[in-house]
Image: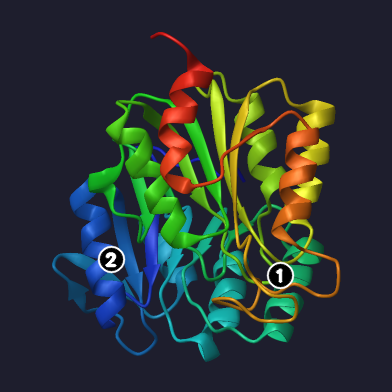
Amino acid sequence: MSIFVDRSTRVVVQGLTGSQGRFHGLRNRAYGTQVVAGVTPGKGGQDVDGIPVFDTVAEAVAETAADTSLILVPARMAAGAVVEAAEAGIGLVVCITEGIPVHDELRTVDRLAAEFPGTRLLGPNCPGVISPGRCNVGIIPGEIALEGGPVGVVSRSGTLTYQALQELTRQGIGQTTCVGIGGDPVPGTRFVDCLRAFQDDPETRAVILIGEIGGDDEERAARFIADEMSTPVVAYVAGMTAPPGRRMGHAGAIISGSSGTAAGKVEALQAAGASVVANPTELGSRMAEVLGPA
């Protein structure tokens, strides 16, 4: 399943009757997203502001032809919610929930790969995905996005996802799709998945990549950029001053020994040909330089 969403995307919100599910589900609908169903076990037959609620995802899919799930449930229920969505035939599962145990994440990602290859998991602990002016699935504020392209955005950091959108919009540069992949140690979707999709997308002329300390996803992305991408990339890596061994923000942002440092990631991205900025406030202006005159 593609990471891209559009006006035809049909969303079921798992956890719609909870406070977070209701808030973000209705906000996504107000943006223009087709939020066609909610799921809360034991509350089937109810509705949230006209959105029907079902006991199971399978029932919601059968009645509404939903193809995308937005998960806003407590951490202890999130892994089961992801698997339930996959079992129901959902193609794109967007899991916002944070605080999921790493072993639960690992088991769930492995199970999806083995049993449900047609399901793509975005997250967990991510802000979601937005195609400005078309569809918003998650918690990204649609007000700061600008439709019309030509820039794709992929980020491990939720907050810096928003800043990247804001910096581009201030420059009058529209976005094709913005994907927050989340910063947990075992994400369902990684940088290379998104870079490949942007490389193949005729609407995307350039990409912003936002990384952070911990893991080796940025180094893998650098290899992909060097070997397979012709689309220019502007990058920022958070955590230049982070001390080794200290967890910064969340589980994915930790340096272990000499691995996962921001400096090493910056070096790899620069060597691959990406244009790396030292401050996230420079993302918009640097992208304007890369794109050149309109």
Residue at 36% across / 82% down in the picture? Answer: 40
Residue at 38% across / 52% down in the picture? Answer: 162
Residue type, mark 1 in image: Val
Left or right: 111 with respect to 125?
A: right
Q: Nearer the viewer, residue 134 or 174?
A: 174
Is the residue 156 above or below the residue 77 in the image?
above
Q: How is the image coloured?
A: rainbow
Q: Is residue 114 visible?
A: yes
The residue tagged 1 is 186
- Helix, strand or loop for disc 2: helix
Residue type, mark 2 in image: His
Question: Quick one: label 2 or label 1, which is nearer the N terminus?
Answer: 2
Percent of width and height locating residue 66:
42, 55
Q: Nearer the viewer, residue 21 or 87?
A: 21
Percent of width and height locating residue 140:
35, 55
Percent of width and height locating residue 94:
50, 61
Q: Nearer the viewer, residue 200 or 268?
A: 268
Q: Quadrant of the C terminus?
A: top left
The residue most toward the left is 49
Residue at 80% across / 27% down in the picture? Answer: 228
Q: Nearer the viewer, residue 106 or 291?
A: 291
Is the residue 256 above or below the residue 278 in the image?
below
Q: Judge the density around disc 1: few (<14), some (14-19), many (≥20) Cα neighbours within 10 Å.
A: many
Residue 24 - label: 2
Which marked residue is nearer to the observer: mark 2 or mark 1?
Answer: 1
- Helix, strand or loop for disc 1: loop
Left or right: 12 with respect to 256?
A: left
Quadrant of the rendered image containing residue 50 = bottom left
